[in-house]
Amino acid sequence: MSGQVLAVVAGVVAVLVLALVALWFSRTRTLARRVGSFGCVLTEANDPRPARGTAQYGATRLYWWRRVSVMPRPARTWSRYGLVVLERSVLPPAPGRPQAVVAHCRVVPAAGGPAQEVRLQMSVEAYAGFTSWIEATPSRVATII
């Protein structure tokens, strides 16, 4: 390859990388500013690796977006009526970080299918909002610990 071709290819790659970074930054900022959104780490039973993301309350669904992604749609969507908190654990405080709560939940995917168990790690304030959001649905008995 000649030097000019290599420079053009490097320039195109640099522009694509900058565009992806700008898209990711815009998406992350938009999600964090939505009403009802909060930072949430998701751990699924079939994949024990935790994934950082942003969750958002909807009228009838809880949406969860993966942090390291540029996809415009949520990675997970769960029905509000099929979401049950089975257990909660308060994590010990870590220096420089707010105290966190892990909610062990049974969820029903909004698209249907069998119930799954997940763990959602969030701040204490986010957990208070999360449980209030669940309790605010009509006919909810024995779904909160």
Image (cartoon, rainbow, N blue to C red):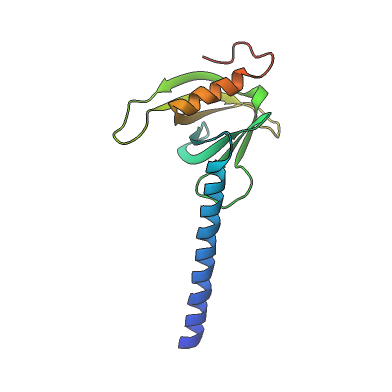
On screen, 26 above or below 16? above
Q: Residue shown at 67%/22% (left/top)?
A: 81
On screen, 75 above or below 22? above
Residue 75 occupies quadrant: top right
Across and down, in percent, residue 9 comes to 51, 78
- State the residue lying farthest toward the left: 95
Q: Is 49 positioned to the left or the right of 131 in the image?
A: left
Is 21 in front, or is 119? 21
Q: Residue shown at 60%/50% (left/top)?
A: 71
Residue 58 occupies quadrant: top right
On screen, 5 above or below 73? below
Across and down, in percent, residue 54 comes to 53, 39
Is 21 in front, or is 41? 21
Total numbered labels placed on residues in the image: 0
Q: Is residue 105 visible?
A: no
Q: Residue shown at 49%/70% (left/top)?
A: 14
Q: Is residue 118 visible?
A: yes
Across and down, in percent, residue 12 comes to 53, 74
Residue 93 occupies quadrant: top left
- State the residue lying farthest toward the top: 141
On screen, 138 above or below 43? above
